[in-house]
C-alpha cells in the first residue's frame, strides 16, 4: 500500500463523514513502545549493553481527528517520529522512521473507544557512528496495521494501549517491527 493510497482512504473517510455534523480537533501524543527484532547491541566500557530494536522506543505524533456528532465514530490521521537510540560519548546507533497512520475508532461508552487502522513508515533508517559503527542502512517499509484501546477524558486528555504490526526490508532481508505501546494524547 502506498502513501497515496493511505491519504486517499483518509480523504474518503472524512468526505463520508462530511454529511453529518462533525467536530475536527488537532491531536498530539507520545508513547513508549517495545518489541520488534534486535537490530544492534551496543556495548559500553563498564560492561553493560543496550539493544536497539525495530519496535522501540519512543513515538511522538501529531495530526487531527474528526468526530461524528451523530454516530459513535472517530477518524484520526497523524504523522509521527518513532525512534530507538543508544548513544555514548564515542558512538551512537539509531533506528528511526516517520510513520503515517489513519485510524478509525468506535465509542464504547464511559470515555472508552476501540479501533484500529493502517500505518506506513517512511524515511526508515538504521544509522551508526564512532565506536558503535555497524553501517548505515536505508530500509523500505510495508504498510502495517494498528489495534488500539483508548480512554479519553472530557477535557481531551487520553491514555491508550496499542499493538502494531509492520515489516521493513533491507538488502533483501525482512525485519519484523511488531510492537506494543502505552501512551497519552491530547485533543485541543
Image (cartoon, rainbow, N blue to C red):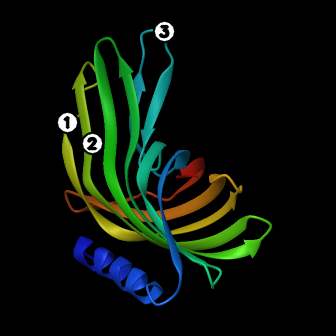
- The disc at residue 96 is none
Residue 157 drawn at (x, y percent): 64, 50
Residue at left offset 31%, top offset 52%: 98
The residue that disc 1 covers is 135
All told, the count of numbered labels is 3
Circle 3/circle 1 CB separation < 8 Å: no
Circle 3/circle 2 CB separation < 8 Å: no
Alpha-carbon distance for marks 3 and 1?
24 Å
For the residue labelled by badge 3, is the local secondary structure a helix, a strand or a loop?
loop
Circle 1 crowding by C-alpha within 10 Å: few under 14, some 14–19, many from 20: few
Circle 1/circle 2 CB separation < 8 Å: yes
- Sequence-wise first label, 3 or 1: 3
On the picture, is 26 further left or further right than 91? right
- Sequence-wise first label, 1 or 2: 2
For the residue labelled by badge 2, is the local secondary structure a helix, a strand or a loop?
strand
Alpha-carbon distance for marks 1 and 2?
8 Å
Residue 14 drawn at (x, y percent): 41, 80
Of labels 3 and 2, the one closer to you: 2
Give the residue at the far front of this rendering: 21
Circle 3 crowding by C-alpha within 10 Å: few under 14, some 14–19, many from 20: few
- The disc at residue 46 is 3
Q: Which of 179 and 181 is in front in this view?
A: 181
Residue 33 drawn at (x, y percent): 54, 46
Q: Is 115 placed above or below 64 here?
A: below
Alpha-carbon distance for marks 3 and 2?
25 Å
Residue at left offset 64%, top offset 55%: 160
On the picture, is 65 further left or further right than 168? right
Give the residue at the far right of this rendering: 110
On the picture, is 59 further left or further right than 89? right
Of labels 1 and 2, the one closer to you: 2
Amino acid at each position: 500500500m502506498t502513501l497515496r493510497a493511505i491519504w486517499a482512504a483518509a480523504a474518503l473517510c472524512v468526505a463520508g463523514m462530511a454529511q453529518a455534523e462533525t467536530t475536527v480537533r488537532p491531536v498530539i501524543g507520545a508513547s513508549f513502545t517495545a518489541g520488534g527484532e534486535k537490530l544492534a547491541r551496543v556495548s559500553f566500557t563498564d560492561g553493560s549493553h543496550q539493544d536497539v530494536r525495530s519496535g522501540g522506543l519512543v513515538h511522538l505524533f501529531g495530526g487531527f481527528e474528526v468526530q461524528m456528532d451523530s454516530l459513535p465514530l472517530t477518524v484520526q490521521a497523524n504523522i509521527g517520529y518513532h525512534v530507538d537510540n543508544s548513544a555514548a560519548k564515542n558512538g551512537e546507533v539509531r533506528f528511526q522512521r516517520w510513520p503515517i497512520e489513519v485510524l478509525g475508532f468506535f465509542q464504547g461508552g464511559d470515555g472508552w473507544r476501540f479501533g484500529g487502522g493502517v500505518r506506513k513508515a517512511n524515511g526508515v533508517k538504521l544509522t551508526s557512528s564512532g565506536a558503535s559503527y555497524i553501517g548505515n542502512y536505508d530500509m523500505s517499509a510495508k504498510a502495517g496495521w494498528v489495534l488500539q484501546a483508548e480512554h479519553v477524558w472530557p477535557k481531551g486528555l487520553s491514555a491508550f494501549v496499542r499493538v502494531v504490526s509492520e515489516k521493513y526490508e533491507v538488502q533483501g532481508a525482512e525485519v519484523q517491527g511488531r510492537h506494543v505501546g502505552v501512551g497519552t494524547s491530547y485533543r485541543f
